[in-house]
């Protein structure tokens, strides 16, 4: 009997991690009916982080709030209150890219994340865990800090515009009314610094709509704002979420590998220790997927337990390194096109599960 641990991340905007795990299990069972499955849906600080904690912690309570989304439009969301007084907040549901109808590279911002943090502070929580993947903006976290009481001022002493658009006008940062931070742990899905060739603008700016012409200017402004905040712009993880990682560090937070933190909470290592096969996955497995994201983390855990690691991804790009896995399956290839895979991800995850099982049971 094969013992299979299912630990995918969510497939951004198409299917949750829990539903992806269920579909993979169904597909595997169609080829290997005697298999035993252990479901451990994952997150790395991006979309699905609150859901992963909610599933893992008995007594966790959603706390509904309305915040300014990344486009300035009200968004109804919630943060999670754990029984021990910890708040869990994810940027994806407050300032995330999936909340946009179209990319807004200059005007999207992180105000909503800051408003969620304020709501948790007003509840007098003892500790905050923040997932900061899936961001929509490259505002350096200025929107978030502004919601927490900071003021970013121009040469006339007036608040600057929200988003990356306002960065070039900032000449001073007034932090005198910034809310005090409790213990804050930030779950990062990448290790990039704030500025430079691997920084927030250079690496992630294009995903948010910045053009090659835009990037040098935004990168320089992020470095300048970091100096105003007395933040080391080369610190790993500060470039996460368009610089929100760095802003949180400036507030007093500690950065932590998101996948490792969630894995510890849900007992993933213990489950993998008893497994023959571990299947992980995400929407797009690419050249950046080795930087602290779920699949590479899961593959390392599987290797340490002498279990076979397998990958199912919405797409696997040409620059992706799949050598960590004994087998991999691309939903796009199985479906024949990206559009078909996106239209019915559960169907093609079932197909991927069957295909991966066939590599062990031809």
Image (cartoon, rainbow, N blue to C red):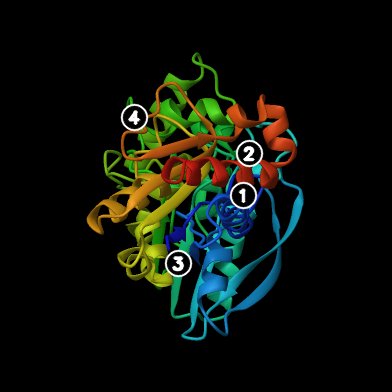
Q: Residue at x 52, y 69 (%)?
A: 53
Pick whichever, 358 or 212, lies toward us.
358
Mark 2 or 3, nearer chain start: 2
Please, what secondary structure does the residue beneath circle 4 have? Answer: loop
Look at the numbered discs 2 and 1 and tell me whether their residues touch, using CB distance below 8 Å: yes
Residue 248 visible in rendering: no
Spatial CA span between label 4 and label 3: 25 Å
Which disc is residue 198 wearing?
Answer: 4
Which marked residue is nearer to the observer: mark 4 or mark 2? 4
Please, what secondary structure does the residue beneath circle 3 have? Answer: strand
For disc 2, the marked residue is: 108
For disc 1, the marked residue is: 95
Please, what secondary structure does the residue beneath circle 1 have? Answer: helix
For disc 3, the marked residue is: 129
Spatial CA span between label 2 and label 3: 23 Å
Which marked residue is nearer to the observer: mark 2 or mark 1? 1
């Amino acid at each position: 009997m094969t013992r299979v641990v299912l630990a995918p991340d969510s497939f951004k905007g198409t299917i949750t991690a829990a539903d992806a795990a269920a579909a993979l299990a169904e597909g595997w069972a169609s080829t290997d009916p005697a298999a035993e499955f252990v479901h451990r849906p994952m997150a790395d600080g991006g979309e699905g982080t609150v859901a992963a904690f909610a599933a893992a912690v008995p007594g966790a309570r959603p706390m509904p709030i309305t915040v300014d989304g990344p486009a300035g439009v009200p968004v109804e969301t919630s943060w999670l209150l754990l029984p021990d007084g910890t708040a869990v907040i994810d940027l994806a549901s407050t300032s995330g890219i999936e909340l946009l109808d179209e990319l807004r590279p200059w005007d999207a911002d992180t105000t909503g994340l800051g408003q969620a943090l304020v709501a948790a502070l007003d509840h007098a929580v003892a500790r905050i865990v923040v997932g900061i993947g899936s961001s929509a903006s490259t505002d350096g976290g200025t929107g978030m800090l502004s919601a927490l009481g900071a003021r970013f001022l121009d040469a006339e002493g007036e608040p600057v515009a929200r988003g990356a658009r306002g960065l070039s006008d900032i000449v001073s940062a007034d932090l005198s009314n910034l809310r005090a931070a409790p213990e804050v742990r930030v779950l990062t899905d990448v290790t990039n610094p704030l500025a430079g060739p691997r920084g927030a603008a250079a690496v992630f700016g294009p995903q948010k709509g910045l053009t090659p012409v835009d990037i040098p200017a935004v990168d320089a402004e992020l470095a300048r704002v970091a100096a105003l905040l007395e933040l080391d712009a080369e610190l790993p993880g500060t470039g996460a979420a368009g610089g929100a990682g760095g802003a949180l560090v400036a507030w007093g937070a500690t950065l932590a590998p998101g996948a490792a933190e969630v894995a510890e909470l849900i007992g993933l290592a213990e489950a993998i220790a008893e497994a023959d096969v571990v299947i992980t996955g995400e929407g797009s497995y690419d050249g950046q997927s080795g930087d602290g994201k779920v699949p590479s983390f899961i593959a390392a855990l599987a290797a340490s337990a002498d279990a076979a690691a397998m990958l199912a991804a919405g797409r696997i790009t040409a620059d992706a390194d799949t050598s960590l896995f004994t087998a991999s399956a691309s939903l796009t290839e199985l479906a024949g096109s990206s559009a078909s895979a996106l239209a019915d991800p559960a169907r093609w995850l079932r197909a991927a599960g069957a295909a991966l099982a066939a590599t062990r049971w031809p």
